[in-house]
Image (tube, coloured by chain):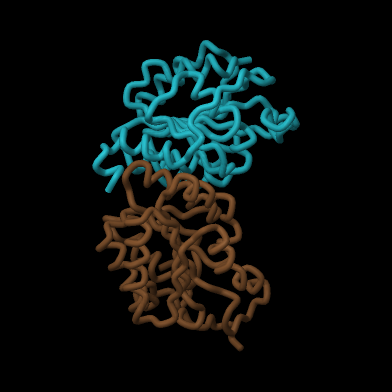
């Protein structure tokens, strides 16, 4: 542990049960690649995936890259999942023309910002429109409000995508993820 | 200066198990002009994504060489992907940028490479060892050998003659292209699973 380590940085303690359930859903569905632009709400899941020897991971410079990456993986016979924050949805829109035009499966897990007790108003414009933007681009959109449902919802979303060649988004609600501590 | 059609045809000659991703615009036509093939993926849109499609394929199929042909315009839109590649450095991936310093598809407007941006230097700065610019046709067969050898992540910018080439029109339907590609690579059973 270097001097830059902050007291709250114990990755094991930060992993929530619903994140373990999502990771278990990945394993059951043989998801072997997870790409992401990090979000605080995905921290525990990212940690589970990066430490899993059966899952390779890619940290992206923009969420757009993840759409092409998942498409390439699928062309090669590998099932991937893309993690992002709601702001990332807006970055991706034209890239979704790959999966629509090629009728490829795509699974995107979106941690929501800008919808509940939001401290940063800059998160609201895209958070507010992310669900509609995904619908507009042809996604089937699932929303998780209760932690108990997360594992089953993600398992169903993965099956929906890969059984029926659909683009599927799972929105993880900001209230479920929990408030970020801004010291207020 | 390098002639694009001849360079692409040289790299794709006797291609063996090579997988090919063609980025939007002229690379799609160049790859098709060299000969249509079930392991060609023609990415007619989604500008900026060709490199990442190649990364996904190279990770999924480490047993095969993968080459991505893209233009300077598309590469500039996906510069970040060069940084993303480096965390994997797939030895079976080659990125070939056909750089005419122009947006050839839309009226020959200058790209940033025409104002001095050096894509090979960008790739090198991102951590891709051996990233280079090639200006001589004679060096293309060496590039082909390097890509087929799958000994390291390869990145080459080919400075090509400006101007348009006769258009060839390969498969445009993405679903048909995907089915054909996956059937050839994975077998019909998995493509239809």
Query: Residue A113 is drawn in which quadrant?
Result: bottom right
The answer to whether residue A56 is visible is no
Q: Nearer the viewer, residue B171 or B27?
A: B171
Chain A: give its colour: brown
Q: Residue at x 53, y 14 (%)?
A: B6
Residue B98, x across and y down, in percent: 58, 26
Residue B101, x across and y down, in percent: 69, 28
Q: Residue at x 42, y 55 (%)?
A: A106
Q: Residue furthest bottom?
A: A184
Q: Residue at x 50, y 63 (%)?
A: A84
Relative to B68, residue A138 above or below: below
Chain seen in cyan? B
Q: In the image, A158: left or right of B70?
A: left
Relative to B84, residue B119 above or below: above
Residue B160, x across and y down, in percent: 62, 20
Query: Residue B164 is drawn in which quadrant?
Result: top right
């Amino acid at each position: 542990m270097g001097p830059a380590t902050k007291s709250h940085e114990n990755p094991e303690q930060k992993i929530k049960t619903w994140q373990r359930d999502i990771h278990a859903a990945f394993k059951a569905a043989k998801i072997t690649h997870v790409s992401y632009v990090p979000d605080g709400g995905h921290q525990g899941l990212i940690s589970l995936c990066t430490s899993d020897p059966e899952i390779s991971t890619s940290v992206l410079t923009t969420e757009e890259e993840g759409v092409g990456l998942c498409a390439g993986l699928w062309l090669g016979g590998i099932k991937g999942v893309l993690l992002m924050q709601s702001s990332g949805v807006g970055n991706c829109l034209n890239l979704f023309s790959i999966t629509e035009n090629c009728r490829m499966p795509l699974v995107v897990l979106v941690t929501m910002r800008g919808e509940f007790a939001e401290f940063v108003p800059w998160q609201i414009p895209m958070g507010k429109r992310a669900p509609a933007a995904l619908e507009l681009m042809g996604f089937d959109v699932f929303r998780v409000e209760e932690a108990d449902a997360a594992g089953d919802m993600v398992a169903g979303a993965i099956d929906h995508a890969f059984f029926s060649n659909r683009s599927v988004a799972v929105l993880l609600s900001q209230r479920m993820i929990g408030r970020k501590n801004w010291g207020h | 200066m390098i002639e694009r059609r001849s360079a692409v045809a040289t790299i794709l000659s006797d291609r063996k198990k090579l997988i090919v991703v063609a980025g939007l615009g002229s690379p799609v036509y160049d790859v098709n002009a060299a000969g249509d093939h079930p392991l060609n993926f023609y990415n007619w849109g989604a500008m900026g994504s060709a490199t990442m499609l190649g990364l996904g394929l190279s990770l999924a199929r480490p047993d095969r060489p993968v080459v991505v042909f893209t233009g300077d315009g598309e590469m500039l839109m996906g510069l970040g992907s060069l940084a993303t590649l480096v965390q994997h450095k797939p030895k079976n991936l080659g990125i070939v940028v056909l750089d005419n310093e122009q947006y050839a598809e839309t009226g020959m407007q200058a790209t940033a490479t025409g104002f001095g941006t050096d894509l090979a230097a960008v790739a090198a700065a991102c951590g891709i060892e051996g990233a280079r610019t090639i200006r001589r046709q004679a060096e293309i067969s060496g590039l082909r050998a390097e890509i087929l050898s799958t000994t390291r992540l390869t990145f080459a910018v080919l400075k090509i003659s400006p101007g348009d080439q006769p258009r060839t029109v390969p498969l445009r339907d993405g679903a048909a292209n995907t089915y054909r590609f996956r059937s050839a690579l994975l077998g019909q059973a998995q493509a239809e699973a």
